[in-house]
Image (cartoon, rainbow, N blue to C red):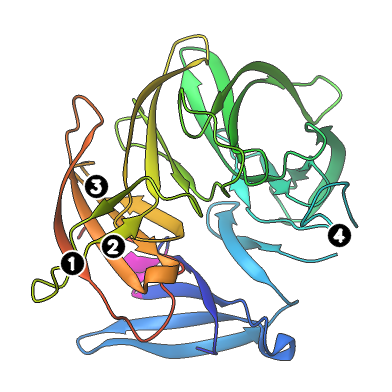
Amino acid sequence: MGPQPSWLDTTLLKSGTVLALNEAWATPDSAGLYALKKGADGLSIKSYLPVLGGPVSSQFYNNNTAVAIAHYSGGHGPGAGQTTSHVHHSILDPTGKYLVFPDLGLDAIHVFCIDPTTGKLTAHDDIKDATGSGPRHGVFWKSGKDTYFFLVHEINNKITSFKVEYLAKGGLGFTKVDEQSTYGPKDEPFGAAGEIQISPDQKFILASNRNVTLSNIPNPDPSNSTQIASDSIATFQPQADGKLKFVELAPSGGKFPRHFSLNKDGSLVAVGNQNSFSVDIYARDVKTGKLGNRVASAYDLPSLPNNVLFIDE
């Protein structure tokens, strides 16, 4: 798999295939897209395709006949960490006609129209974001006939709500309707927001915060009484007009939660706490959206847990 796996994609799991990306910062020439075969003994490499350096996200599109990969490379913006273009996420819109790519380095969202016959992409006008904000990951959300896009920013630690317009000339228009700190009422400018996801029932938005300790929590190792520092997971409830209502700030289970995921019914949240070398699973109340107790933990892992997914079969 290479030294720095960064992403997993289970879209083709029913056919026995899992896609994985190797970020390969230490050895850029080894960056690649792997097709892994699911078997009784786990996963094995089925095929490998070299790709550009820094692949960090994949998105199937065109009825799963093509895959778009976001590469953290290339341009620049004015803020710290914005010396180059950093495309960090590939996202398919609800119609299946557009792909959008938040660019952390350029403070923009790149928009592409999909040719349904060939799968080729045509670039449309970029959507400009706030200067120095560092857009990282996003999710689309439907409210009646309206479509909204929630965008989490790594540099200013904000979630911005946009109302989406499908332009007659082609492309997308984004109108800002709300902005909330990823720390809720506590505006914390020194962290580094990471992931954003929507709950399976579409009623809650969750986002991870890195580099700012929320609290000290019990050690996952039952033989160790020393408490550990924990970053946080924020929960919001989207309103019909696209605005966000803060619900809570809860422990992530460790440090630097780069990624997290929810199981099929939304009753569990698995968090990859990168710098703690742990995956921590929390119970979640699907009605209130609040996280409960930590119910399981895999700690002292041999490598950084950059991406975690539930497999509900």
What amino acid is at disc 3?
Lys
Query: Magenta segment, which residues?
Result: 12-16
Q: Give the image location of residue 299, x and y in percent.
A: 25, 75
Residue at 79%, 21% in the rendered image = 167
What amino acid is at disc 1?
Pro
Residue at the spot of label 1: 220
Q: CA distance from mark 3 to mark 4?
A: 39 Å
Residue at 38%, 63% in the rendered image = 273
Q: Which mark is residue 228?
A: 2
Q: Are marks 4 and 1 in contact (CB under 8 Å)?
A: no
Name the N-terminal-most of marks 2 and 4.
4
Q: Are marks 3 and 1 in contact (CB under 8 Å)?
A: no
Mark 4, Cα crowd under 10 Å, few <14 / some 14-19 / many 20+, is some
Q: Give the image location of residue 123, x and y in percent.
A: 85, 45
Mark 3, Cα crowd under 10 Å, few <14 / some 14-19 / many 20+, is some
Q: Nearer the viewer, mark 2 or mark 4?
A: 2
Q: Is residue 114 above or below residue 51?
A: above
- Secondary structure state at the residue bearing disc 3: loop
Q: CA distance from mark 2 to mark 3?
A: 29 Å
- Secondary structure state at the residue bearing disc 1: loop
Instruction: Tell me if residue 265 can be seen.
Output: yes
What amino acid is at disc 2?
Ile
Q: Which mark is residue 174?
A: none
Q: Give the image location of residue 215, x and y in percent.
A: 32, 47
Q: Are marks 1 and 2 in contact (CB under 8 Å)?
A: yes
Between 71 and 93, the one nearer to me in the picture: 71
**Does residue 95 appear to the left or right of 215 in the view shown?**
right
Instruction: Tell me if residue 311 can be seen.
Output: no
Residue at the spot of label 3: 264
Q: CA distance from mark 2 to mark 4?
A: 34 Å
Residue at the spot of label 4: 83
Q: Give the image location of residue 75, x and y in percent.
A: 90, 57
